[in-house]
């Protein structure tokens, strides 16, 4: 695993944290929406969607990760999350052997290169572009759930909830405006409680950042998107992250131990310098 792969890993996390504009398309095999769901008053539809989110303590799955920047990189991966504490993505490009890891906590990000024995450890502010996201917000993104920025799960009476509007077809657009941050963000939600997209707008103009969700399935914890794509622009270069979950391996509320992935065998490199070098 070369330096440029690690750089892509870091840069695509910008897309994860900096939300974005989006368009949605219907894919074969997606579930349909009943007329009754479409006709529900919009506020009640919002409440129904939020009520479908059941509480959880841990989530694990296997699948595939595709990372795009100046080059494309794909690998099998294992994802594990401890609610409110951590997100871990284990990169396993060869015979299931872990060669790298992304480890996110409430205030930091670690990207580990096990092949070349180095790691990046930075404060989340390095890649959040000033947006006050927390670990709960990021976990909600990974689970295709609506959230209130910096406060975790969205509530129907959230003070930053600006509007709920009818979109195309069965789509409902839920827009929130954080105070004193100069932007808004919108969730596009189908009548069957599937969050299909997330976008951000600055002064009313959509930006080149987006999250699209596909291939939803019903679980005891609500609708989950088994495929989601994040895309962003950084220094004129498009960067992207796609995760595909395998429903056969999804596990909820099963205890496991998540340890800090670095030890004395690894040396630290500067994340900013590595990232800047990638986009020169």
Image (spheres, helix red, strand yellow):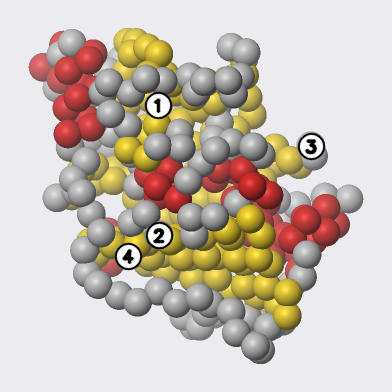
Closer to the observer: label 3 or label 1?
Answer: 1
Using residue 192 as the reference point, say whether residue 78 is left or right of it. right
Look at 38% across and 25% down and name the residue there: 188
Q: Residues within 10 Å of mark 1 (few under 14, many from 20)?
A: many
| Res. 212 in view | no
Marking on residue 187 = 1
Q: Nearer the viewer, residue 12 or 152?
A: 152
Closer to the observer: label 1 or label 2?
Answer: 2
- CA gap, disc 3 and disc 4: 34 Å
- CA gap, disc 2 and disc 4: 14 Å
Numbered label tally: 4
Look at 32% across and 65% down and name the residue there: 60
Tell which circle, 1 or 2, labels the residue nearer the N-terminal end. 2
Is disc 3 placed on a helix, strand or loop?
Answer: loop
Residue to which mark 4 is pinned? 60
Q: Quadrant of residue 155?
A: top left
Percent across and percent down for residue 110 are 60, 65
Percent across and percent down for residue 219 are 18, 49
Q: Residues within 10 Å of mark 4 (few under 14, many from 20)?
A: many
Tell which circle, 3 or 1, labels the residue nearer the N-terminal end. 1
Is disc 2 placed on a helix, strand or loop?
Answer: loop
Residue to which mark 3 is pinned? 236
Using residue 205 as the reference point, say whether residue 188 is left or right of it. left
- Report the quarter where the N terminus lies: bottom right
In this view, 178 is above or below 97: above
């Amino acid at each position: 695993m070369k330096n440029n792969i690690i750089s892509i890993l870091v840069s695509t996390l910008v897309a994860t944290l900096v939300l974005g504009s989006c368009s949605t398309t219907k894919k074969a095999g997606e579930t349909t929406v009943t007329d009754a769901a479409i006709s529900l008053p919009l506020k009640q539809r919002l409440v129904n969607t939020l009520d479908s989110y059941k509480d959880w303590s841990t989530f694990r799955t296997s699948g595939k990760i595709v990372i795009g920047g100046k080059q494309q990189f794909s690998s099998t991966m294992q994802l594990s999350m401890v609610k409110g504490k951590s997100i871990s993505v284990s990169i396993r490009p060869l015979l299931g052997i872990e060669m790298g890891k992304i480890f996110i906590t409430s205030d930091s990000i670690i990207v580990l290169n096990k092949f070349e024995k180095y790691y990046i450890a930075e404060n989340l502010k390095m890649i959040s572009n000033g947006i006050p996201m927390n670990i709960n917000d990021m976990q909600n993104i990974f689970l295709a759930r609506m959230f209130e920025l910096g406060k975790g799960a969205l509530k129907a009476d959230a003070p930053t909830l600006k509007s709920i509007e009818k979109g195309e077809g069965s789509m409902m657009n839920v827009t929130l405006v954080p105070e004193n941050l100069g932007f808004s963000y919108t969730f596009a939600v189908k009548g069957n409680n599937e969050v299909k997209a997330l976008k951000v707008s600055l002064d009313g103009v959509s930006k080149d950042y987006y999250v699209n969700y596909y291939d939803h399935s019903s679980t005891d914890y609500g609708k989950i998107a088994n495929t989601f794509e994040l895309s962003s622009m950084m220094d004129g270069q498009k960067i992207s992250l796609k995760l595909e979950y395998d429903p056969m391996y999804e596990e909820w509320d099963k205890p496991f131990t998540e340890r800090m992935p670095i030890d004395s065998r690894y040396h630290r490199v500067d994340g900013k310098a590595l990232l800047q070098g990638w986009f020169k």
